[in-house]
Image (cartoon, rainbow, N blue to C red):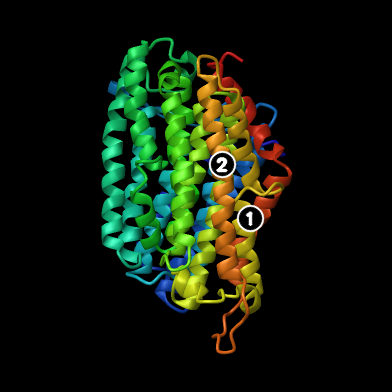
Amino acid sequence: MIDINESVMQFLLAFLVVGPLLGAAAALLPAPPGLKGRSPEQAVLRHGVTVTGAVLVAAVVLALGFDHDQPSKMQATTDISWIPALDVRIHLGTDGISLPLLVLTALLTFLSALYSYFKPPAGPSAKAFVALLLVLESGTLATFAVLDLILFFLAFEMVLVPMYFLIARWGGEGRAEAAWRFILYTLLGSVVMLLGLLLIGISAGTFDMVALATDNGRSLTTSVQVIAVLAVGIGLAVKTPMWPLHSWLPDAHTAAPTVGSVLLAGVLLKMGTYGFVRVLLPAAPDGLRTFAPYLAAFAVVGIVYGSLACLALAQRGAKGDLKRLIAYSSVGHMGFVLLGIATMTPTGVNGALFANIAHGLITGLLFFLVGALKERTGSTDLDALAEQTGAALYGRAPRLGGLLAFGAVASLGLPGLAGFWGEMLALFGAFDPADGLSRPAFLTFMAIGAFGTLLTAAYLLVVVRRVCMGAVPQDAPHLTDVRGYEYAAWTPLVVLTVVAGLWPKALLGLTDPAVQQLLAGGTR
């Protein structure tokens, strides 16, 4: 790691939040003559790659300059009064919990911009597409960087409009209805969440998330905590998405353009689970303890439900859509994250944070691969892809088939890849939950979650068999294998999935001290 001045670190974190917004404004301006290249569309797409690349570099430098000996300490902090009457402050900072999410967001947005440069999504102007992508990035990064409840809410809401337009204007079949369902669900959840955040801030006398974490709910009565957790939790559960508030997700993913699906699964779903860890766990622990068994119950139902839905879609003759199947798999995978949080133990919460990152890497890769498959074959319908003998991707496009199989086995939690550790730690956390939680109930949840891992393996192996295996028919049309720009966009995700699987300490070494301090109320 490198030694970087604190003021430079503050600038880097502020740039992560503000840089994409400035880039979005610049994308709407006419391109200077010297930068137009072949066309104005190409110029603005190149601008998108440049800005997201600069943000990624800033995120990596921030991670390198981060003091890894003190990951529980808020670093690169900025604290400026913004609305004195309400005591709302522009308070930014990062610790071992938020840093991996900042880097993941910057990476996935850059890879999405790079992919779009070579394969622009069909739809209206490229200018609007790049501007929306950058606003989306800014809102997501701000959610993980701000330390004020009101700013957290504003950043949380900021991503809704760009994602709505990305689905509605650049999406596929059924995009208008999917976009409306996405925005209605998330807006209704957000209204309730705002009331809960105001209740916490006004009752505690501060909206500062660090002060609330240090106070650890001592200035909030149990009844206030219960009401706050219920209100805020509903908003976060919609975004996560938790069963049964998930029904907007499959339609949104199926209709979204490839990069929209990558960002929706890779970073937007993480905002909900991050809110549980950053806001509710430290600020209202008694309220969360009241609801923890119910949260765990919904989580394991989501794990089994998502897996059964995927199994149904994967069967021959079901007319299952591959994008829809991966969307339902997200409901199951995020169930493990919620189960880990519900245990309220360091093991479970660390598992949840690890599973968050692993899901972003693996599901982002899977959505990229399905987008490439649709571009080559014109369909994501499993029956149309697999025909009678299987799509035989191994024979027709071996590298593409190999990557799809890699993504599938990583998603099912193969030991040695990133998907394994988060799910295992979440189940370990359920084996021995926090004091005050019913151990028999959590042992039951653990058993159901473990059964869900078997179902996950079943549907993913069915998909691999149907799409990748089989004899190549004589009249099979030629399929282009992985192109150069696809290698560039997908290789980092493959490498990081392997690295996180083989060296989990890289992530757990960051999150564990921060989680221990969060659960102890800042007293460690």
Left or right of 1: which side holds 263? left
Q: Position of residue 42 (x, y in %)?
A: 45, 73
Q: Position of residue 400 (x, y in %)?
A: 61, 70
In the image, what residue type sits under mark 1?
Answer: Val
Secondary structure found at label 2: helix
| Closer to the camera in the image, 195 or 244 | 244
Quarter of the image with the N terminus is top right
Disc 1 to disc 2, how far (Cα)? 17 Å
* View extreme (bottom): residue: 475
Give the mark nearest the N terminus, 1 or 2.
Answer: 1
Residue 95 appears in the figure: no
Above/below status of 307 relative to 484: above
The residue carrying mark 2 is: 451
In the image, what residue type sits under mark 2?
Answer: Phe
The residue carrying mark 1 is: 409
Residue 516 appears in the figure: yes
Q: In front: mark 1 or mark 2?
A: 2
The residue that appears at 62% across and 46% down in the rendered structure is 419
Quarter of the image with the C terminus is top right
Crowding at dot 2, Cα within 10 Å, few <14 / some 14-19 / many 20+, comes out as some
The quadrant holding residue 75 is top right
Above/below status of 262 relative to 231: below
The residue that appears at 65% across and 47% down in the rendered structure is 418
Above/below status of 432 relative to 6: above
Q: Position of residue 89 (x, y in %)?
A: 38, 27
Above/below status of 413 relative to 285: below
Q: Are marks 1 and 2 in contact (CB under 8 Å)?
A: no
Q: Position of residue 49 (x, y in %)?
A: 51, 62
The residue that appears at 42% across and 65% down in the rendered structure is 318
